[in-house]
Amino acid sequence: MLYTIVVAIIVLIGVAAISWVGMILYAVFSALFEKDHDVKVTVAGSRKQAVAPRPQRIDYGNGMRLGRYTAGAYGDALTLAAGGRSEMFCRLVIAYADAKEDVTSRIIDVMAFSTAATPDGEVVPYNLEAFCELRKAKRNFRADRILECAIANTGEGVSDLMSVLLSAPQTVAFERKTAILHTVDLPPVILEYQFRAPTFKRVTVKPEVIGYSEESNGDHRNWTLLFVDGMMEGKTERQRFKAERIQQVWIADHEAGIDDMSRFFLADVIPRENA
């Protein structure tokens, strides 16, 4: 009898202990679940309230604004599109707003550019690869961040940047230099040309295209004639005449020679104030 009573008491104590442990575990897991649930609700609510800020058009003064040369679109509103040019030369003066919104005046020699499309589908200039005289190095310039633009050699204001870039002269590699090509309308000339050293031969040529280079030397701009492409009398294909091998030039049917060969061929290229 006594044994039975002891066993019953032990069983009751065990059942009570198990019940208390179960209640404690339930309370702990319930608290953890509620905490995790609250966190998830809070995060979800934050995501719903997050709204990307719209880009604000900055007033740079004097009517200058982003997107002036990209049909009013700028930033993420532009999407890359096929088009553009390479191996070109276009010298521009620009007022440029960089990513920090600092505005500086730059003189750039554009060598290539890509295009983008506006939300309306208009194709506009996008990235300009150019040599920057301010930094003395190649840089990339976003067309939508150009606030003002003018032709460097003439000062003429640019209203249609795409047209200016598309009509810019082509360039070619010439004896480790970059030659700018320019079509000329000149009368036939007589060249005293060295085909083979050491003798020179006089030939009649109708100039069609010239190749030249230009670079800054301090505050001065230098233009150098590199070659003349034209039809030589007696030939059926265009010939190239290197400037360094031309000793003398005459206009056909004129006895007097041309004193400054470079200025004669580059008359349409060199600005009048530099001529």
Image: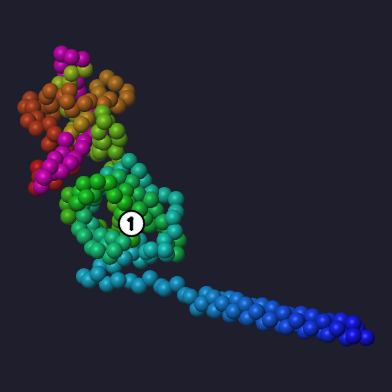
> Which is more toward the observer, 224 or 163?
224
Q: Position of residue 156 (x, y in %)?
A: 19, 56
Which residue has dot 1 on it? 142
> Which is more toward the observer, 205 or 129?
129
What is the quadrant of residue 263 in the picture? top left
Residue 20 in view here: yes
Marker count (numbered): 1
Residue at left offset 28%, top offset 60%: 98
Q: Is residue 107 left or right of residue 160?
A: left
Q: Please give the range of residues in magenta.
A: 196-224
What is the quadrant of residue 73 in the picture? bottom left
Colour convention: rainbow
Q: Secondary structure at mark 1?
A: strand
Q: Is residue 271 left or right of residue 32?
A: left
Residue at left offset 54%, top offset 79%: 42
Q: Is residue 121 left or right of residue 62?
A: right
Q: Position of residue 41 (x, y in %)?
A: 58, 79
Asked if residue 221 lies in the magenta stretch, the reply is yes
Q: Amino acid at mark 1?
A: Arg
Q: Residue at the far front: name it.
A: 2
> Which is more toward the observer, 251 or 20?
20
Q: Quadrant of the N terminus?
A: bottom right
Asked if residue 174 lies in the magenta stretch, the reply is no
Q: Is residue 52 left or right of residue 151?
A: right
Instruction: Look at the picture and state if 60 lies above or below 41.
Output: above
Q: Position of residue 127 (x, y in %)?
A: 35, 53
